[in-house]
Amino acid sequence: MLTIPRDLRDKIVAHARRDHPTEAYPSRTDISYASEPGAHYVLVSTRDADATEFRSFRIVDGTVTEEPVTVAE
């Protein structure tokens, strides 16, 4: 389960690639639809059932930049 703090809910766009288990990286479609330069685009891959691939990116003017993610339990 992904829990997003209230103060970040309007700044995070998240989705999982369940139908197309690929790398957690923005697709060309994701990049073309990215319209909020202040948003964090969080992607989760389900390609490996034994490992969680959880990554976050900034997408500004078509440029994708990965940002560090810390998972807290």
Image (cartoon, rainbow, N blue to C red):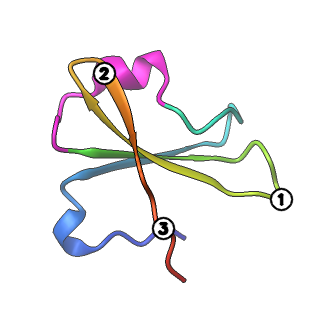
Q: In this rendering, would 29 be left or right of 60?
A: right
Nearest to N terminus: mark 3 or mark 2: 3
| Cα distance in 3D space between marks 3 and 1 | 18 Å
Q: Nearer the viewer, mark 2 or mark 1?
A: 2
The amino acid marked with disc number 2 is Thr
Quick check: is 27 in the magenta stretch? yes
Q: Amino acid at mark 1?
A: Asp
Tell me the distance, in whole angstroms, between the alpha carbons under discs 3 and 2.
26 Å
- Among numbered discs 2 and 1, the one appearing first in the sequence: 1
Circle 1 — which element? Answer: loop
Task: Give the quarter of the figure containing the N terminus.
Answer: bottom right
Q: Which residue is mark 3?
A: 2
Q: Residue at x 45, y 59 (%)?
A: 69
Q: Which residue is situated farthest in the right direction here?
A: 50
Which residue has dot 2 on it? 63
In the image, the segment drawn in magenta is 26-38
Is residue 33 rendered to the left or right of residue 23?
left
Q: Residue furthest front?
A: 68
On residue 50, which mark appears?
1
Relative height, residue 49 to residue 26 (above, below): below
Residue 72 in percent (x, y) is at: 49, 78
Q: Could you tell me which quadrant the C terminus lies in?
A: bottom right
Tag 3, which secondary structure? loop
Q: Amino acid at mark 3?
A: Leu
Is 31 colored magenta in this rendering?
A: yes
Tell whether label 2 touches label 3 (CB within 8 Å).
Answer: no
Q: Give me the residue at 29% from left, 17% from top.
A: 62
Question: Residue at horizontal 40%, vertical 26%?
Answer: 30
Q: Nearer the viewer, mark 3 or mark 1?
A: 1
First of labels 3, 1 by sequence position:
3
Residue depicted at x 16% and y 43%: 38
